[in-house]
Image: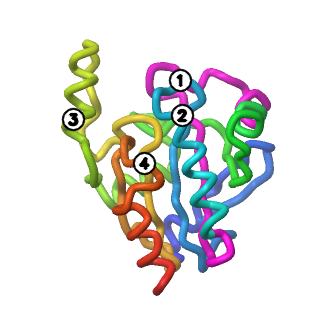
Amino acid sequence: MSTDIAAIPLTRIDGSTDSLANHAGKVLLVVNVASKCGLTPQYEGLEKLYRDYQDKGFEVLGFPANDFGAQEPGTHEEIVEFCSVNYGVSFPLFAKADVTGEAKQPLYAALTGAVPTKQGDVEGMKERFRGYGMTPNDDPEVLWNFEKFLIARDGTVAARFAPAMEPGAPELIGAIEAELAK
């Protein structure tokens, strides 16, 4: 695992400590999540990916963030309950933290630095935001909730996907399967 990213201290949503080093040798999908977003139903697809590929060395890691439209206002306990009750989420969730701007957590600074541009429908999403009078973030910043970073078994950032890229999209599944095959 890439020493820089692997060594970044992380906090699980239950307060326990973690790092990507504890997930070494696995293919990881790091996703900033939110409970009150139009994309929140992606939790269902993320859980399906996790269950379908977990036994092959794959994990989804969810990072709640309240950066976009205050769409993750809950406490850690409320987030866990929401995810469990509504989507049966069993993949690891981490403490809520910023994924954009000056206060962004070190992991997201490293991820966006490693792969500054994302795949998928970025311009269409930006146009929708502008239509709502919002100013969307430009690369390398995270655009919105449910942006996805694929981390290879060796700890390098293999790909980055736009928020609207559904977990079941062929491009995302193909990238996951390619990394698992390595």
For marks 1 and 2, give the one nearer the viewer: 2
Judging from the image, what secondary structure is the residue with disc 2 in? loop
Q: Tell me whether circle 2 and circle 4 mark residues in contact (CB < 8 Å).
A: no
Residue 166: which numbered mark, if any? 4
Q: CA distance from mark 3 to mark 4?
A: 15 Å
- The 10 Å Cα crowd at callout 2, few under 14, some 14 to 19, many 20 or more, is some
Q: Which residue is mark 3?
A: 124
Please state, as top left, top right, bottom left or bottom right, where the N terminus lies in the image. Answer: bottom right
The numbered mark, 2 or 4, whose residue comes first in the sequence reads 2
Rendering coords of residue 79 (x, y %): 71, 32
Q: Which residue is mark 2?
A: 40
Judging from the image, what secondary structure is the residue with disc 1 in? loop
Amino acid type of the residue that numbered disc 1 sits on in the rendered structure: Gln
Q: CA distance from mark 3 to mark 2?
A: 18 Å
Range shown magenta: 54-80
The numbered mark, 1 or 2, whose residue comes first in the sequence reads 2
Judging from the image, what secondary structure is the residue with disc 4 in? loop
Q: Which residue is mark 1?
A: 71
Determine the residue positioned at 60% across, 48% down.
Answer: 62
Residue nearer the viewer, 77 or 102:
77
Rendering coords of residue 61 (x, y %): 61, 55
For marks 1 and 4, give the one nearer the viewer: 4
The numbered mark, 1 or 3, whose residue comes first in the sequence reads 1
Determine the residue positioned at 36% across, 53% down.
Answer: 161
Determine the residue positioned at 25% across, 44% down.
Answer: 121
The numbered mark, 3 or 2, whose residue comes first in the sequence reads 2
Q: Is residue 108 magenta?
A: no
Q: Tell me whether circle 1 and circle 2 mark residues in contact (CB < 8 Å).
A: yes
Side of 180 relative to 25 (left or right): left
Side of 21 relative to 70 (left or right): right
Q: CA distance from mark 1 to mark 4?
A: 19 Å
Residue nearer the viewer, 55 or 98:
55
